[in-house]
Amino acid sequence: MKRNRGVAVLALALCSALALTACGGTTKDSAGAQQNQQGGSATADPNAKLRTGLKVTYLPKQINNPYFTVVRNGVQQASGEIQADFKATGPSDASASSQVTYINTAAQQRQDALVLAANDQNAVAPALKAARAQGMKVVTLDSDVAADARDVFVNQVDSSEIAVKQVELLSQAVGGSGEFAILSATANATNQNTWIGVMKQELAKPRYSGLKLVEIAYGNDDDQVSFQKTQALLQAHPNLKGIVSPTTVGLAAAGRYLSSSEYKGKVALTGLGTPNQMRAYVKDDTVKAFALWEPAKLGYLATFAAAALVSGQITGAEGQGFTAGTLGKYTIGKSGEVVLGPPTVFTKDNVDKFDF
């Protein structure tokens, strides 16, 4: 991929929204794509070269979450390939408003792009809108925000596809019938709620008439809270046959509890997890199968989308395309969404083939 060797011309603008004082710069690349100073929008030029020296901030839901550490690796790799200045920051908890300060700081530091996994689609929206008004491009991944608060959303998989897959794995694990519970992340997590909504629709189909959802619990993407919620679910529902956890923290915590409890082999567990976290539980038969995408690729793709936005190659409009390094070409879909690809199902047969 060619890189723009020109020196970008930065222009400062005064802004006051949410006490943000520094504004992102405007550039005109070698192909002539000019950014709009007021809204940060641009006229797309697919032939524009990627700018070098971009300043990219990665803001995960939690800085100490193993899953988001893997995503960070992808962001960092892509940043290196496009010669961007990369930094990672974020809260230690996944509360709704915990990311606002970090968004404000990124804008004040004149970051060109923010790659964000949102804890809440609405709580962070005002800060993101103010930052975008100053020129910073916003790419969300994993969990989206309101569409008018970001430029592009990089979805790990098609939401319906991953939700349907989890119901399928659960049904297989419990033999097609019985009570089960969902152990989710936070009550306001956009992706979790989207998947759960699709799962409920799928459960209404005749082939899943034997399955009964008895409770949705929230572990707040905290290992110890998720561990305790698993215990509480088992105590509250003596006929429970399965748990599905659409969050890596919850799945690992539930696996740890079940593996050393009287419920091992009696209560099935599936959901979304990383091979490295779940390997031991697969090998000791606590978990038969679980699913996920490759998180590093998610961060990698989002970073190239951010670079394409800053460089004027895309604006986030449906139908626009860009090249994401070694992943190849991607096209923006409805509402500014880009989909990474289908999920992978991990079992005892293939879990050792993956290292993340």
Image: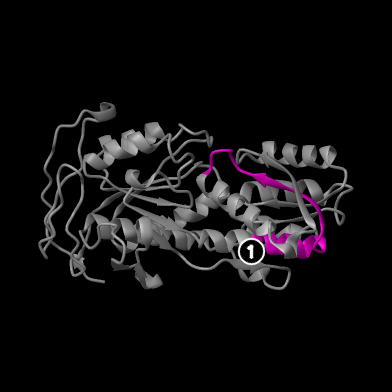
Residue 204 is situated, as x and y percent measured from the top left of the image, at: 68, 57
Q: How is the image coloured?
A: one colour
Q: Residue at x 18, y 54 (%)?
A: 42
Between residue 75 and residue 225, name the one nearer to us: 225
Residue 320 is situated, as x and y percent measured from the top left of the image, at: 28, 66
Between residue 146 and residue 21, name the one nearer to us: 146
Tell me, yes or no, whether the highlighted magenta stretch contains residue 169.
Answer: yes
Q: Is residue 46 left or right of residue 89?
A: left
**As drawn, 328 above or below 337:** below
Residue 1 is situated, as x and y percent measured from the top left of the image, at: 26, 71
Residue 138 is situated, as x and y percent measured from the top left of the image, at: 32, 48
Tell me, yes or no, whether the highlighted magenta stretch contains residue 184.
Answer: yes
Between residue 101 and residue 175, name the one nearer to us: 175
**As drawn, 228 above or below 355:** above
Residue range corresponding to the magenta coloring: 165-189
Q: Quadrant of residue 187?
A: top right
Q: Is residue 239 left or right of residue 131?
A: right
Secondary structure beneath disc 1? Answer: helix
Q: Residue at x 35, y 68 (%)?
A: 331
Q: How many marks?
A: 1
Q: Quadrant of residue 24?
A: top left
Q: Amino acid at mark 1?
A: Lys
Quadrant where the C terminus is found in the figure: bottom right
Q: Residue at x 11, y 56 (%)?
A: 28
The answer, for residue 272, to whether it is visible in the render is: no
The answer, for residue 121, to whether it is visible in the render is: yes
Q: Residue at x 15, y 48 (%)?
A: 36
> For mark 1, does the 10 Å Cα neighbourhood hold few (<14), some (14 to 19), or many (20 or more) residues?
some
Q: Which residue is mark 1?
A: 165
